[in-house]
Amino acid sequence: PYMFIRNPWAVEASGHLVSKKVEASGPNGRCFSFWYNMRHPNSGTLNLYLRTADNSSDLIWTRSGPQGRAWLRGYADTFSDTLGNAVFTGSTSGNSHAAVAVDDVVIDPYGCPAGSCQFEEDFCNWRNFGTNSNTMRWYRNSGPTMSAGGPSVDHTLKTEKGHYLLLDAQDLAKVQIGVLDSELLSYGPNTCFRMFYHMDQGSDAKITVHFLGVSGESEFGYKLQAPGKNNWTLFQQDVANLPSIYRVRIIGIPGSKRKSDIAIDDIEVFSGKCSGERVPSTEVPLTTPDSATSSTETTPTKTAPIVESTTSEATSESVSTTSAEPRTAPVLACRPGEFNCRDGEHCIPSALLCDGVKDCPNGLDEKCGAL
């Protein structure tokens, strides 16, 4: 069960959900974490307030408008030296199908891990950018990839049962670019970003990591190329002078070679500087948020990012972005009510999605975290 607000009579609805008394926070604050759903055609609002003992309220989290079909995870850090209550307030539009729902509210005595994810349970509010079916999609995967061009195990658990995010080179989407966005973050102005990535040795695939302001303007970007060995490779970067609120965007561009899958895992984002040796790189302002260009290949040098073993190397350089020229593939047009397997050949009834049976030859219909 979950809690929700809905009014079938096509008028605005509102409601309040109040927690029991919450103890004062420690020096690290506390984290309110919860799941919420505000699917189309909702144009309502969901707020989270901290009500103190004197009945004053501070807004600590808010969302408005449609937020997609999936359940999303919300986080809010708070600091308080008195008893208080957490108060959810919600309102819906006048549409009879509009609803605002919350579930699994947890109060943690430590700070929130927004932006960081091991992908073992879900996307942790990382999302495929946009709804264009012509672009590639990142999805959670475990074990080897279909082309054997990706990892055989994840980085977190180092087993075939562990999960990581995959941009599958077998996805024959028309636009061969996959864009992954974080939720809005507020770790600035100085932030450490860490991520493990996997690209097959010799692959011409590329990853760019961007930092975007709330209006979509690009602050900085860093390009990653295939390392010298087929290992999980650590990229970590200190980023300075970020705005107070921003998001991270990861763009993957599979190469033209057969083994050109791209995998990422164990993302960490936090305020301050990365521990240990940082990844030297010259920061260059970006010009556009949604595209990336290749640059001249360089021999790994002292500017290579830290890697998981002394035998793995990878090149990393800051990039300015211009329009990309992605590979294209024949587009298969499916009929209404059908799902495109993205292999250029197969359409299946939409009713067969996420039913535990791989109806698409490539199994894409069961990669439900990305659909």
Image: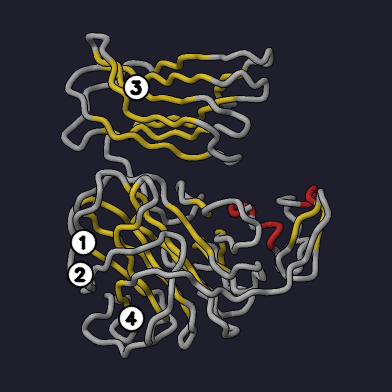
Task: For label 2, count other residues whose C-alpha is less than 10 Å away and answer few (under 14), some (14-19) or many (20+).
Answer: some
Give the Cα distance between marks 3 and 1: 32 Å
Disc 3 target residue = 49
- The residue tagged with tag 1: helix, strand or loop? loop
Q: Quadrant of residue 111?
A: top left
In percent of width and height, residue 335 lies at: 83, 55
Q: Are marks 4 and 2 in contact (CB under 8 Å)?
A: no
Of residues 183 and 54, the one nearer the viewer is 183
Q: Mark 4 is on which residue type? A: Thr
In percent of width and height, residue 313 lies at: 33, 83
Of residues 35 and 23, the one nearer the viewer is 35
Question: Residue at 25% across / 22% down in the picture?
Answer: 23
Task: For label 4, count other residues whose C-alpha is less than 10 Å away and answer few (under 14), some (14-19) or many (20+).
Answer: many
Label total for image: 4
- The residue tagged with tag 3: helix, strand or loop? strand
In percent of width and height, residue 318 lies at: 30, 72
Disc 1 target residue = 274
Disc 4 target residue = 315
> Does the image show residue 162?
no
Disc 2 target residue = 278
Q: Quadrant of residue 229?
A: bottom left
Left or right, 366 with respect to 269, comes to right
